Amino acid sequence: MWMEYHNPVLLKETVKGLDIKQDGVYVDVTFGGGGHSREILASLGPKGRLIGFDQDKDALLNVIDDPRFLLINENFRFMQRFLRFHGVKSVDGILADFGVSSHQFDQPERGFSIRFDALLDMRMNQQDVLSAHSLVNSYEEEALRQVFWQYGELRTAPALAKTIVQARELKSIDTTFDLKTVLSKHLPQGRENKILAQIYQAIRIEVNQEIEVLKDFLLQTPSLLNDNGRLSVISYHSLEDRLVKRFIRNGLFEGEPVKDVFGNFEVPLKKVGNLIVPTPAEVKLNSRARSAKLRIAKKVNSSK
């Protein structure tokens, strides 16, 4: 069932990056269909432990029947809090795959895809108050412009925001196709789907607070990981990947770290290997893998 829910990207490479110890404790913060989790469990011994996180209630249908596994139905921005609640203070590895699952894209009623005409939604947690519908119909023009500029990197952000505000004064923008129709004059022929994808990405990131969640998550990893513990992270767009790369490199999201008189600075994580991307063969089998970027890091030994 899980392969139908989501075909995991860079499966072997991501799990290999965790350098799994048979009796270790690991966390998969983006459980989804459970593909990465099953691969981790296959490498764990009887004393090993795996904790999964997923805020989407649909993911509960994929729970793994294994005494070594626990699935927590919560947002992984609260990872440390819920791990401690379950008696876990430190772990040997953390895996994160930030992509929207195939299941979410392929369910028309979730409103994630430009392929289907459905109510604007895009919530990864269906209990959240903010949806794509409320965002499109209530955000002020300047706030909309910021969303499209910052999260979609769209040069036409001011025009997109203005068009939406003008259109909703006449009639609410209820569905994905409503939004596409309203913005049709900003969708050049031949690039229509690309621009729409950027627009949808921007709205989805804002609805789910994806950038803030990513930052909250990364900031927790150094204190959770044991010495030499591993972090494997898959990103799908430049906004995410830049944050992951910078955090691994210098422990910050912006600015430069404080250096000593010799020009050295301490960082909590150390890069392991180089950037990993899917092979052409994997992209051919799973087109959603084409933009995936895997970065691996390990916790710097605190005794040094």
Image: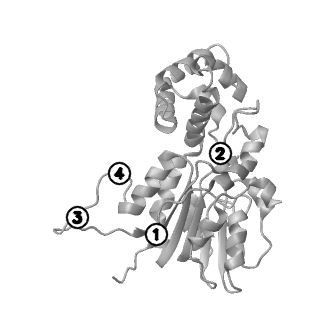
Q: CA distance from mark 1 to mark 2?
A: 36 Å
Of the two numbered discs 4 and 2 in the rendering, the one whose residue sits closer to the viewer: 4
- Depth check, mark 2 against mark 3: the one in front is 3
How far apart are the alpha carbons under marks 4 and 1? 21 Å
* Secondary element type, mark 4: loop
**Can you identify the residue that label 2 sits on?**
128
Q: Nearer the viewer, residue 99 or 293?
A: 293
Disc 3 designates what residue?
Answer: 259
User: Separation of disc 4 and disc 2 at Cα?
Assistant: 29 Å
SS for tag 2?
loop
- Res 272 label: 1
Q: If you read the primary sequence from the N terminus, does the residue marked by circle 3 or circle 1 appear first?
A: 3
Left or right placement of residue 1 versus residue 187 in this view: right
Task: Verify CB contact (< 8 Å) between mark 4 and mark 1.
Answer: no
What's the distance in space between the residues labelled 3 and 1, CA to CA?
A: 22 Å
- The three-letter code of the residue at mark 2 reads Asp
Residue drawn at 54 percent across, 29 percent down = 139
Residue lying farthest to the top in this orientation: 170
Q: Which amino acid lies under the numbered mark 1 shown in the image of this protein?
A: Val
Residue with the mark numbered 4 = 254
Sequence-wise, the earlier of marks 1 and 2 is 2
Please report the residue visible at 33 percent of the width from the left and 82 percent of the height from the top. 304
Q: Give the percent coordinates (x, y) of residue 66.
A: 77, 76
Q: Is residue 186 left or right of residue 9?
A: left
Cα distance, mark 2 to mark 3? 42 Å
Q: Are marks 4 and 3 in contact (CB under 8 Å)?
A: no
Q: Is residue 58 above or below residue 93?
A: above
Label 1 crowd (10 A; few <14 / some 14-19 / many >=20): some
Residue 113 visible in rendering: yes
Is residue 89 something one can see in this rendering?
Answer: no
Nearest the camera: 2 or 189?
A: 189
